[in-house]
Each structure stands twice: as C-alpha cells, then as structure tokens.
Image (cartoon, grey):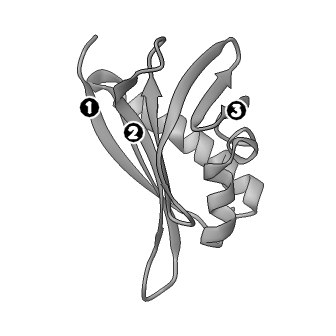
Amino acid sequence: MDQKVRYEIEFPINSSPQLLYQYISTPSGLSEWFADNVNSRGEFFTFIWNDSEEKARLASKKSGEKVKFKWIDENNKDTEYFFELHILVDELTKDVSLMVIDFAEKDEVDEATQLWENQISDLKHLIGSV
C-alpha cells in the first residue's frame, strides 16, 4: 500500500461546542452525517457506507473538544491511519470551527477534501448552521 499523506481542513460551524460534540462522538450523531450507519461495541466503531464497511477504534476523546478514530485492520489491530475531529473555539470571538485531520493517497487528497466538504455541509444542515 502506498504511503498516505496527512492533511487538515478547518470548517467554520455556527454551533455550540456541546451540540457539535454530540454529532462527532456518538454512533447516532455520526450516522446522521458521516456514514449511512454507525455501530459501536465498546471502543470499536463500524462505519457503513452503501455496501462497504470500515472499522475503527476510538483512540482518544476529550469531552466537548475532540475525538480520534484509528482505522483497524481485519485482525482488529490498529493501522497507522486515523481521522480526528477537533472542535476549535476562538478565545476572542467565540467562533466555533471543526478541524478535520485525515489521511489520503497523495493523488486523492483533493477528492478526499471534497468528500469532507460534502459531509460537513450535511452536518451544518443538520444543526442549522447554514
């Protein structure tokens, strides 16, 4: 497998950090905008899109701030890849944004970024941040 490259995208979101956190940290919240369905068993999450299924482990979370999912292989072992959703609040303006940290093949970063833009757009519609 080719080495994937890390990339970050920041999306301004008109929402309270607490509400946003519910949508990025719970299976029910994630299944409303990130995947068609999300199941969890303990720290293991299964993300389902159409006919494909990916498994990840909730590697870390900080209540109200961020979640980090590490992709796991078929043996339930961590891979080196993850995605992280980090809620940022500007100290002065109190503006809220969501930082996405993810990995993609070098020639697929634009496509992956577009996918995140579409998903975050769905999230914004859900929470009334359009």
| Quadrant assignment for the C terminus | bottom right
Gap between marks 2 and 1, in whole Å? 8 Å
Q: Earlier in the sequence, mark 3 or mark 1?
A: 1
22 relative to 2, above or below: below
Q: Earlier in the sequence, mark 2 or mark 1?
A: 1
Can you name the residue that lies furthest to the left here? 3
Badge 3 is on which residue? 38
Name the one closer to the observer, 71 or 13: 71
Gap between marks 2 and 3, in whole Å? 18 Å
2 and 3 marks in contact (CB < 8 Å): no
Q: On the image, which quarter does residue 16 sit in? A: bottom right
Under tag 3, what secondary structure? strand
85 relative to 96, above or below: above
Which numbered disc covers residue 5? 1
Place of residue 33 in the rendered image (x, y in percent of width and height, measured from the top left) = 69, 42
Three-letter amino acid code at disc 1?
A: Val
